[in-house]
Amino acid sequence: MPDTSNYLYYNVSDLTVVDAEGLYVRDKDGNEFMDCSAGTFNLSLGYRHPAVVKAIKEQADKLIHVSSSYQTHPINEMTSTLAELAPAGLDHVHPKVSGGSSANEGAIKMAQRVTGRTEVITLFRAHVGQTMAMTALSGNQFRKTPFPTLPRFGIQVPDPYCYRCFYGKEPETCGLLCADRIVDFIEYASQGEIAAVLIEPISGNGGNIVPPEGYLQRVREICDARGIKLIFDEVQTGIGRTGRMFASEHFGVVPDAITVAKGLGGSGAQVAAIITNDGLLGLEPDHHSFTYGSNLIAAAAANATLKIIREPAFLQNVTIVGDYIMQRMRALQAQVPIIGDVRGVGLMIGLELIDADGSENVAATNHIAKMARKYGLLMRTSRYGRGNVLKIRPALNITLDEAETMCDRLEQLIRGGITMKRLLFNAATAIRRAAHSNRAQRGAPSGHDSPGGDAQFDIDLIAEQALWRYLERARTPLAVYTEDGALRSVGDGDPEAFLIVDPIDGTRGAAAGLESSMISLAVTRTSDPPRLRDITDALLMELTTGRWMYAHGDSFEAHGYPYTVPAQTNVTELKRMFWSIEFNGHPVHLMNDAYGHLVDMSSNTGGVFIFNSCAYSISRIITGQLDAYVDVGNRILRDHPETRIDFERAGRGNILHLFPYDVAAAVPIAQAAGIIITDAYGDSFDNMSLTDISSENQRSCIATSTRELHEQLIAAIRW
């Protein structure tokens, strides 16, 4: 199948789906995945449910479309069934909408019409649709910034988010302050024109937030006292998702309107509706009507879906399986500190992932979601990848056996996603602590060289010893290659992974007490021989501050920096670049011949630095403090073999260019952060062996913040 994805307006995953059934999705290579998100939470009966497929085919043979001005059996059946199943008093169904966004917008129009008011209250993390009006009413600044003409008629109030209470209260003693403060927003933040409160009983995209007992009742009371209409957005929570037909039933609250979509179509049919009480009647048909609303094929699918989901045994299964998944995830939470909270009702479940200090761990959440395919799962995260909640919302007809398999894979995924990261972080922390506790002696030369011939200082020995002490305590079976210790094995049994470590990259800076040193660790699960392209996890930790950068595949994470990282610059002019150059083991006259003119060009209008640390220099490009890093020694030697004697003289008889341990962590982290990084020929580091320190395997490097600057540097250096 030819790849035509480049014609799409938006970016898509590299996963090409060719078939699906039930919970399972299959790609073009025959790989099978359990879909933990039921498509986009809309496949209540999974992929290709036979009853839904049969209903669609039969309806297509009769009538595909007719104007919604006329009556049809599929629409009459769907509306009467929804009215029958809805909470008491919600007896009227508006089906001339084509999705959740238009359903919510229609409900707002109804409220505005009957109240004569304009304003609407929603929650901070609300996601109530994608139209201009619903984007304006949704929370999240990132969704609104690109659209300067959004209507201004919404007021967002804090979510009933007990795990991260906006008001800093505890659920047992807060007195439902998050509900009561809505009165203050009405009094002080509105224009006195509140027509409606639009709220999801359990937040969908906002992080699976389940309100505390009594919250929705209090909101209902606030609305009733002020003539405000209460609308429940049940686009995600409705049609059995929580073990009841509607989530509102769990909370004992009947709103003025409920909007439904997504799961109503069973296996992906596009169908939606607004279910209202008498108090919202009167909106004229031409005030809210869509061509593909009241679609007959979609209504037929909805009728087949409702017949199945309304059965008590079906809804009971949702509750039983949901409880099982929650129990498994809470048991896992007790074992892995990265899970801060497990919350949900029925099969609407969220896992909140946290950092060591309890803060939102967005990077780890995205990292684990990306890894999910390796474990046979498809997963989605909250807030369009900006949140820290993994969403578990499979098809509602999932069996206990399937749930057990899903939980087994989830456990492996989450453990696998954090085990290597934790190992790297703990090892780096052990090295850093040892270096700081031996600060007085770390600057002295040790009197011996590394196997590659580089001079070692006491700081190197301190760091190396701390690493081995930690690895011996950790007992994880590993093959380990370090700058000073060459190749060794630790732990019991056959090695599970290959670990390559430069305990101190930037020895001279560390010995001098400067801030230009990094601890560098990388892991690959392949061998014979392991190459740089095989690296799965990489960590760089600043020796002085403890700030760190981490990459797994193409996911990047940074911690401790005072601003968002990566933050690379967009500099494209050589004369304005801030750059770092390498001199350890490099004859000065050869380096001057190669780029002395660039030093002259940029030293005043830009900046030139020497850190003697590849990892630190590259990390400064990621933080936006540098624009480029240049180490051209190895290319000069390859292009001009006669210079070998000069390089050996500068290296005290050795060739000292970039060794595998110098770049093993820096390169994949730079790539994950979006840095342009190659050798001085413009070639990738992929084939670099991680255990060969010969000059033939050593490398040069040019790393830049922009591709234009990278191309100019390669062209401008005098080879």
Image (cartoon, rainbow, N blue to C red):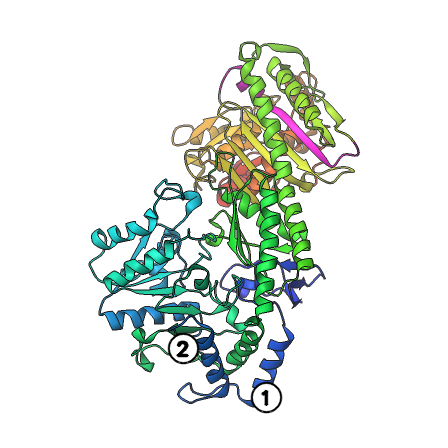
Residue 109 placement (x, y as % from top left)? 30, 71
Q: Residue at x 75, y 29 (%)?
A: 491
Q: Where is 418 relative to 239, above or below?
A: above
Looking at the image, which is closer to me, 57 or 111?
111
Residue 346 placement (x, y as % from top left)? 54, 58
* Quarter assignment of residue 633: top right
Asked whether residue 506 is drawn in magenta, I would say yes
Evaluate if marks 2 and 1 touch, with contact meaning CB atoms under 8 Å apart: no
Q: Is residue 154 left or right of residue 96?
A: left
Asked whether residue 81 is drawn in magenta, I would say no
Q: Tell me the magenta residue range.
A: 493-514
Q: Where is 170 relative to 548, above or below?
A: below
Looking at the image, which is closer to me, 127 or 711?
127
C-alpha distance separating marks 2 and 1:
26 Å
Q: Which residue is mark 1?
A: 61
Under tag 1, what secondary structure? helix
Q: Which residue is mark 2?
A: 93
Quadrant in which the C terminus appears: top right
Q: Residue at x 38, y 68 (%)?
A: 104
Tell me, yes or no, if residue 406 can be seen here: yes
Residue 504 placement (x, y as % from top left)? 60, 23
Amino acid type of the residue tagged 2 in the rendering: Val
**Mark 1 neighbour density, 10 Å: few (under 14) some (14–19) many (20 or more):** few
Amino acid type of the residue tagged 1 in the rendering: Asp
Q: Where is 703 relative to 541, above or below?
A: below
Looking at the image, which is closer to me, 683 or 693?
693
Tell me, yes or no, if residue 659 can be seen here: no
Under tag 2, what secondary structure? strand
Q: Residue at x 60, y 42 (%)?
A: 682
Mark count: 2
**Mark 2 neighbour density, 10 Å: few (under 14) some (14–19) many (20 or more):** many
